[in-house]
Image (tube, rainbow, N blue to C red):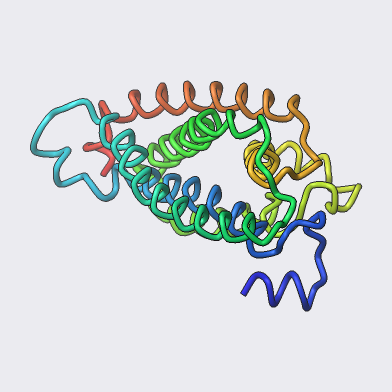
Amino acid sequence: MFIVIFGRLAGISTDGLPQGLFYMAGILCWNYFSDCLNRTSLTFKDNQHIFGKVYFPRVVVPFSIIISNLVRFGIQFFLFAIFYIYYLAQGIPIHPNIGVLLFPVLIIIMAGLALGFGMIISALTTKYKDLVFLVQFGVQLWMYATPIIYPLSAAPEKYKWLIVANPMTAVVEAFKYGFLNQPDFNFGYLLYSAGFTVVILLSGILVFNKVEKRFMDTI
């Protein structure tokens, strides 16, 4: 669908990279992040019947979501690897570079961002229950503010600063740089994403731990 709509009909550039791999690389990263964020944001809502009966550190639940989603991510990465090897066998110049060493770091950043945002949203949903629907819609819009269907180099210049401010932008670009040898990569953007992740994760943990002490009264 992405190839037909964005590649052929819209004619959006992929920086000369195979369209199939370009879109798969972006979707692979985004699926893990968005699924973790959506599920983590429902922590209090989906587990209130358990939280109300047994006490245990509530923060275990969102962390378990992040870890369990790694299995799904691994399966999707395996499918990506199959297509990747196929294109390599065809002689397409997509040879990996030293950037692949950042792969574990990228996973940590995606997990940290999803966990931080998810815990903050989950805490807010104890008071604003309809926020869940807004979040799901917002995450879908967020994808188009991330270079999933286009490279950062093809972004409109007047909106580029906004896309760069998106912490997921550097993660997706770094993944494409390492595995697809995409030329447009800025290590400074990745450092920004890492710093943003630390701040949002610590904030999420603090807010989550504060709300968990009184959330049953609110719900």
Q: Quadrant of the N terminus?
A: bottom right
Residue 120 x %, y %: 45, 35
| Viewer-nearest residue: 212 or 197 | 197
Residue 196 x %, y %: 61, 26
- Count the marks: how many? 0
Q: Residue at x 78, y 58 (%)?
A: 14
Seen in the image, is 89 located left or right of residue 216? right
Where is residue 124, by image quadrant? top left
Q: Residue at x 52, y 37 (%)?
A: 110
Instruction: Residue lying at the far left in this picture: please name it.
Output: 53
Seen in the image, is 155 located left or right of residue 105? right
Where is residue 208, by image quadrant? top left
Q: Quadrant of the C terminus?
A: top left
Q: Residue at x 80, y 41 (%)?
A: 183
| Viewer-nearest residue: 161 or 188 | 188
Does 119 sit above or below residue 141? above
Residue 94 x %, y %: 70, 49
Residue 67 x %, y %: 33, 37
Seen in the image, is 114 located left or right of residue 138? left
Instruction: Residue lying at the far right in this picture: please name it.
Output: 157
Seen in the image, is 54 located left or right of residue 185? left
